[in-house]
Amino acid sequence: MSAAIPVPPFAPGPRLSGGGFLSVPGTSGGVAAADVKGNGKVRPDIAVFVAPGVGAAVTTRSTAAAASCLWTRARVPGPVHAVVVNAGNANAATGQQGVSDNAAMAEAVAETLGCETDAVLVCSTGVIGVPMPMDRVIPGVRTAAGSLVATGDALADAIRTTDLVPKQSAAVRGGITVGGVAKGSGMIHPGMATMLCFLATDARVDPVDLQQLVGAVADRTFNQISVDGDMSTSDTFILQSTGLGPEARPGTPAWAALEEALLAVAGDLAMAIARDGEGATCLITCTVEGGPDDETARRAARAVCGSSLVKAAVHGRDANWGRVVGALGQAGLPGLDALDVDFAGTPVLRGGRPLPFDEAAVTAALQAPDVSIACRVPGSGSGRAWGCDLSAEYVRINADYRS
């Protein structure tokens, strides 16, 4: 019997139990209920994340980017004091009025906190093409910024839209703390980062170095998740540094510790988003070992997790591993004549030749909340991606999204 393909854990090591954004020294936050969607369901939907220092960010590559993404791009890397978020309205495809409304949100936070307007970043998520209800949003923003006593749980909850669960993580490596929250459940196929993710660290980092690190971490985590193949207009990943901890410069042990902590927290949040995909019943993890480089391997792994046919097969508990081969070929992964595949932990292909396997055992393994797909071809590349199964419930959720 063939041995299984070795799959090491991603970013192993301890996490801070119950940790999140507020685990980082120098951070605080506030929330408010503004009924941003205007449906009368009053719950916290405005959040302000405060971490005075410097910041970096990456935003969606979509050419339909929301006003908030354009604002953030123009201000990082550089001084960042706070981030204001609304959950319910994407403020995308809203024209010049959307640009003005976005600036007004930043100005309201700056006036309340006594900081520069340009040191306030903005994020908006929700329905596209609907003007912001500023008569409700601005009072909510001022309330959130004026009472920075929210718990980590409250911050994580306030940024949710269709998410079923809040998402938080924190870790300490080498005396450096990283913590954060994220939201995302549908419209998940990022081309930069995640739907919305807010991380903080106490490491003292030059903002230009921080920007480089944000992009590298995004490529290994948030850019490797896919729920439905649709890129959001609002995707934003922001990292703030309070500078209250050890100095971290590239090439130093502190830098390695910071990167390790960031990968741990970002990896946790990326997996949480994929696991919480709209209508999902399981998390799919695909690893690809081999190929000419890591970028090729990552692209192939994401193709598997993003394949509607793979996702449907997993949902139907169908041991149709041929769907994996098709996705790898579509991604252009070389060396498939020597491909090895483990499907739900069972070796099904070695050296490009199918193996006899116990289909009932694979079907049973596909019932688990975590399904693994491991692939191997010649080469030194290595990549990993996360996704979820595709269910009829996904269609129902999105058919009723506005109503």
Image (tube, helix red, strand yellow):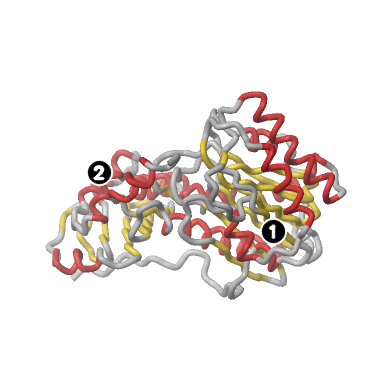
Label located before the other in sequence (2 or 1): 1
Name the residue rendered at 68%, 29% in the picture.
99
Residue 191 is labelled as: none
Identified by mark 1, the residue type is Ala
The residue under label 1 is: 200
Measured as percent of width and height from the top left, residue 24 is found at: 71, 66
Viewer-side residue, 1 vs 213: 213
Disc 1 secondary structure class: strand
Label total for image: 2
Q: Would residue 324 be visible to someone looking at this image?
A: no
Measured as percent of width and height from the top left, residue 400 is found at: 38, 42
Viewer-side residue, 32 vs 219: 32
Spatial distance from mark 2 to mark 1, Cα to Cα? 40 Å
Using residue 114 as the reference point, say whether residue 20 is left or right of it: left
Disc 2 secondary structure class: helix
Residue 326 is labelled as: 2
Measured as percent of width and height from the top left, residue 153 is found at: 61, 65
Viewer-side residue, 93 vs 378: 93
* Quadrant holding the C terminus: top left
Name the residue rendered at 64%, 33% in the picture.
67
Name the residue rendered at 29%, 51% in the picture.
391
Q: Which corner quadrant of the image does residue 401 belong to?
A: top left
